[in-house]
Each structure stands twice: as structure tokens, then as C-alpha cells.
Image (cartoon, helix red, strand yellow):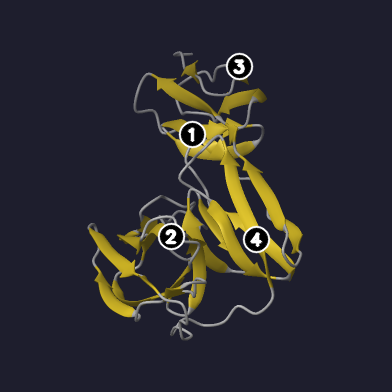
Amino acid sequence: MCFSDVVGFATPACRTVTVSVGQTTVVEGVFTAQGLLQVGVAPAGLPTTVFVDGEARDEYGYFAFMEPGERVVCWGDVPGHQAPACQTVTVTAGTSTTVTGEFTPSESPTPGPAPSLGDTGQLRVTTSPAVPARIVVDGVARADWGLTWAKTPVGSRQVCFTDVPGFATPPCQTVTVTLGETTVVEGVYVPLGLIRVAVAPAGLPVDVVIDGVGRNQFGAYLYLEAGSYEVCGTQAVGFVSPVCRTVTVSSGTQTDVTLTYSPP
């Protein structure tokens, strides 16, 4: 049993449970609140790579949710400027932490404390439509909403996207970053439709079955991909079950269905 992503929270791990005949198995997914880290650059617009805990995150600045705790923030070298020292900041759940790296003009700057990325190209990642998805590159969470021409080591890179409620999550993409060139990746989020299945009389302990898969008891309320679905209800003692219904779910809209049980 797994849980989808929710912006601003750490997704709980999948759980393996045992369901026994006649017994109730209870599972709780604990979503831990994250904190928002905003990293600025001064002067604004300098093409510096922001590093957090030794990992390259984004270019020109950084704005993303992170798990609470101490974080080490560094800024990559920029020609004609002296990079600032790294800073240690504390990210707190449910709050925003802001830190700014101040660059100073210099004709002969010395290498700053940020790690070297070696040979790089630029990686530009967007979502369509613009949604608060987290961009993950080679298993490392890079930034929320997108990547802004981030310097990335050359080679093959896997770009993935986190879940956004109400949308189908795009698949991961494998791309090649080439020296001195920009690689553009777009994650297309397709709007889902919302289906609400009610049971009448209310409170009957019947399972709602959609396309042969049991979804919930007493009713159902969930997002589905656009398309045609068969909605059925299991038997209830003392009632005649309704016939299955075929309904159409459309993107961005809600479809209401009522399964009406009648006395024999």
C-alpha cells in the first residue's frame, strides 16, 4: 500500500500489510510537514549554481520544500565575482527560511567553497501546465516548479516528476546533457476527472467497484483519468442491488453517480 505525493509534506513509505478474514486492518500514512527553503543571490541574476548539502539544486536561486533540519548552502563560482562562504541554516517544518549569498566583484577571484561540477551543459525543466511539482534528477530532488537553465554534468540524466493532486504524473525521461548546450525537458501533467459515488440509502455497508476493482465502502470519491468506467456496488443484505452504471469521466470536472438500493 502506497501513498501519492503532497506538496509541502514528506511522502510516507509504502507499507506491506496482511488482511485477515473477518478482521479490520488499519493503515496510517503519516505525512511529515516540510519547511520551505528560499535561497537568493546578490546581485540578482548572477548565473550561480545553488548547492544544498553538497548537491547542485538550481541556478540563479532556489525555492523548494525540504525536510526540517540543518542545511549547508553554497554558491558556485561566477566569473568576475568572488563567491561567498557557505552558510548553515535551519529549516523548520511549516515555515520559510531565507538565505542570500552576497557576491563581490573581483578581477582575480579565488575558487569558492562550492563543489566543482566539471564539464557541464544546461538543463531546463518545465511542467505543462505550471504545477508545484518537484523535479528529481538522478534521484536527487532539485527544485520545485522547474529548473532554470541549471548547470548539469554532461552525460545521461534521468528526470522525474512528483505527484500533483488532480493530475496524472508524467513518466520519467532519460535525456543527454551535452557540453555547452541546453537540454530542455517538459513534464506534461494531464488533468484528471473527479468521480463521486454515493450509496442510497446512506450508510449501507457496500463496496463501490469501478471497472472490477473495489475502491471504497459506503461510497467513493477519487480522481480518475478521463474515459468511460463501469460503476457497480456489492450486495447488501435485505436490499436489491442496483444495476451497474456506465459513466464518463471528463478532465477537470466532477461526475456524480448514485447507487440506489431498494427493498425486495
The kind of residue on which mark 4 rests is Gln
Query: Which mark identifies residue 222?
Result: 1
What secondary structure is marked by label 2?
Answer: loop
Decide which of tag 3 and tag 2 comes sooner along the chain. Answer: 2
Q: CA distance from mark 3 to mark 2?
A: 38 Å
What secondary structure is marked by label 4?
Answer: strand
Which of label 1 and label 2 is nearer to you? 2
For label 1, count other residues whose C-alpha is less than 10 Å away and answer few (under 14), some (14-19) or many (20+): some
Q: CA distance from mark 1 to mark 3?
A: 21 Å
The spot of residue 82 in percent (x, y) is 41, 77
The residue singled out by tag 2 in the image is 11
The residue singled out by tag 4 in the image is 122
The kind of residue on which mark 1 rests is Leu
Q: Is residue 146 left or right of residue 156?
A: left
Q: CA distance from mark 1 to mark 2?
A: 19 Å
Residue found at the very far front of the displayed protein: 107
Decide which of tag 4 and tag 2 comes sooner along the chain. Answer: 2
Which of label 4 and label 1 is nearer to you? 4
